Image: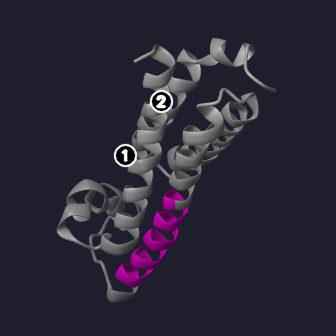
Amino acid sequence: MSNFLFWQKWLFGIGSLLTVFGLALTCFNQTPVFDALFNNQITPVFWPAHEITPQIIRFQQWICGVLGATIAGWGIFTVFLAHYPFRNKERWARNAIALGITVWFVTDTSLSVYFLAMFNAAFKTVVFVAVLLPLLFTRHEFNQGRA
């Protein structure tokens, strides 16, 4: 497998993982798995007294549902961009992924740092790097591709 195909499949895989993660976050955000992975890191930042009322849980269900749906949609866009135009080395697809991931990362991570949700900032950094790697390692391929 060529270096380019490896990174194209990597990007496709990241998009697939984002889709599954987003759907799981939407449907299962108040389960023990998400409590261990996310809620136990995020909840104390905003509710340090650990007095979690039913209204707070309802808000968390809603906000995680909306966020999960957004992540799933973003993952699907990434899958389709990686599978078709990125694989065909269409520069616009690479640029769309690069700009989208950068705007998301800067905005989301800045808010996370501002609100001291450092776990979220760290998690976003891992996702950003995972998407950025194929863009960096394949950039020379797009100099020859269709504009």
- Left or right, 17 with respect to 88, comes to left
* Looking at the image, residue 83 lies above or below residue 147: below
* Looking at the image, residue 8 lies above or below residue 35: above
The residue where tag 2 is placed is 129
Q: Quadrant of residue 28?
A: bottom left
> Disc 2 marks which amino acid?
Val
Q: Nearer the viewer, residue 4 or 26?
A: 4
Q: Is residue 48 visible?
A: yes
Q: Residue at x 47, y 29 (%)?
A: 129
Q: Residue at x 65, y 33 (%)?
A: 98
On-image quarter of the N terminus: top left
Q: Mainly helix, strand or loop, the magenta region? A: helix
On-image quarter of the C terminus: top right
> Disc 1 marks which amino acid?
Phe
Q: Quadrant of residue 34?
A: bottom left
Chain part drawn in magenta: 56-72
Q: Nearer the viewer, residue 103 or 5?
A: 5
- Label 2 secondary element: helix
The residue where tag 1 is placed is 119
Q: Is residue 117 visible?
A: no
Q: Whole-Å distance between the Cαs marked 1 and 2?
A: 16 Å
- Label 1 secondary element: helix
Q: Residues within 10 Å of mark 1 (few under 14, many from 20)?
A: some
